[in-house]
Amino acid sequence: MAKYDLVIKGGTIIDGLQTPRYRSDIGVKDGKIVAISGSIPASDATRVIEAAGKIVAPGVVDLHTHYDSQLFWDPWCTMSGWHGVTSVVIGNCGFGFAPCKPEDRERTMLSLTRNEAVPLATMKEGMPFDWVTFREYLESVERTPKGVNVMSFVPLSPIYGYVVGIDEAKKRPATDEELQQMCDLVVEGMEVGGCGISLQIAPLGVQTDYDGTPMVTDTISERDLTAFCRAMGSTGRGISQLTGTLESAEFMARESGQPAIWNALMAEGALNQHGGARMTPKAAIERLKVLNEDEGVRVYAQAQTINFASQFTLEEYNLADMIPCWKEACMGTVAEKLVKFADPERRKAMKDMHELRGGLFGSGYVMDRIKVAWIPLDVPNGLELQKEYEGFSIGEIAEREGKHPIDAFLDVALAGQLGTGFETEMIRTKPEHMKEIIDCATGLPGISDGGAHTKFVTTGRFPTDLLGVWSRDHNLLSLETAHWRLSAYPAQAAGLKGRGYLAEGMAADIIVYDPETLTALPQERLWDYPANEWRLVQKARGYNYIIVNGEITFIDGECTQATPGKLLRHGAG
């Protein structure tokens, strides 16, 4: 019998602990790293990876994902699985599917159709929904084949739904008895392996419910929030995750006595698809420094570290909900939206907003430079429309047809029955602004949003961008620091034991890559979701091997079909 299941020979090891890089071999047995030595004989291994000239590093820990449903039909949680991620954390922003009574399943799924833009038909077809309690949900995740490791927050929205009812909880405060029951569910969720509580407290219009109303936690009272934080804190462990203000994250850390992760730290000039930051980067970083260093309040900042571009249609778009005139027009059925987008009065409001704020939806996307990426062939005159519009910018079309850019944009969308695809240019953050974010002492690169907004954005490529764009191309940080921030630091923050760095006795979650060729490939559409739904993705080039628990899941971007991933229960080794 071979001494090792796998030996990685001759690679340059960056261990994730900011140790200076060195060349050595790694021996793996039974899913663990059992030897790191410069002289492991190839004959001692069942399989050998020749890694000379490659970087050997710990797999990436992706703390902010929404793979709560996708993991049931996509074991590798792509896009994350393509970009070196070996462990994901789900249940972010308070969104999830457990606990959930059988009669509330469709209502629970409906909430995810708008705030995270997961198609309803896909969830219905792709999820087993063989659970009621959070414990049973984790058991379902555990028995589902996985190509990555999965840990989960205890999301608060489904707890409100289970005890009070989603819609009822928006109308009235929870009774004392209901609040106690919900706190008991938080403790129960922690006891079965949840890593903490999560919620969204956002202004009206950011990631709304399917009907345009706030998510149930958006209007949470201080009484309820205090009770939930103290319930988690009573377990003596855990971390809270918040999409909201830094002040609210600080409150949660104080009340729970446990760390908090705040979303999000944004570079100056970066695009935030959720409506923009309330603090300047400098102010946020300074406050984080005071909290952590002076006041002993542990608050991490999930940092957006990618350049931003998207493709989208108006058929299901939800990332303009901060702007009332766009939100109103983007709600409803396709038939209703066709009428709204043709209405001159609504268009006037959109033009006024365009002139006031600039860009599309008041974002950094310059309207004139947005291109028509595709027009469906199955619409009337589809072939002729493709020839007339595909590949042209809105500015070119508006000039050619003598129209206001908003009219040109909406007319092309209507011609494609809202299935017209638009492509934005890349909004590139200035390196000096990105360095400020990357250097933040408590910053955790990420916000992949993996599993969410899959028809619009491809932020799951963040590990590849940090290693390729910001480390190699712009020299903003060393690879030693980059891998620490991508792996060991987030693992430590989330309490993910036995993962995040390379050492004897650690889980063999390992990536082997070519630092010179590592890059994200162009955006493309894949029709690989249940119910024949499509998604926008970016694959990667340069990852030679991705290894999870000692088994190879990807070789040069091709999936091996191996599913060695595990459910990671917080508090367990």
Image: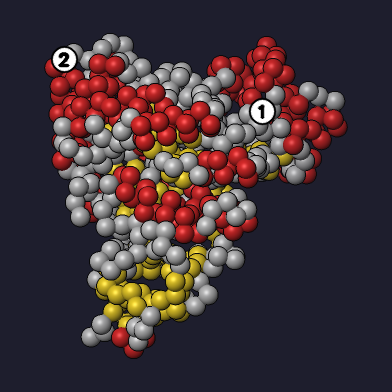
Instruction: Name the spot of residue 511 as percent of width and height, x first.
Output: 43, 64
The amino acid pointed to by label 2 is Asp
Horizontally, residue 505 falls left or right of residue 309, namely left
Which corner quadrant of the image does residue 317 belong to?
A: top right
SS category of the residue bearing label 1 = helix
- Say which residue appears at 41% left-offset and 27% top-offset: 246
Residue hosting label 1: 360
Q: How many residues crowd around disc 2 within 10 Å: few (fewer than 14), some, or many (20 or more)? A: few
Q: Quadrant of residue 217?
A: top left
Residue toward you, 419 or 361: 361
Residue 398: x percent and y percent? Answer: 80, 29
Q: Is residue 153 visible?
A: yes
Looking at the picture, tell me which residue is in the foreground, 425 or 481: 481
Residue at (20% x, 55% y) in the render = 573
> Going by the picture, which residue comes out furthest to the front?
294
Q: Secondary structure at mark 2?
A: helix
State the residue in front, 31 or 106.
31
Q: Is residue 526 visible?
A: no
Q: Identify residue for label 2.
A: 176
| N-term mark: 2 or 1 | 2
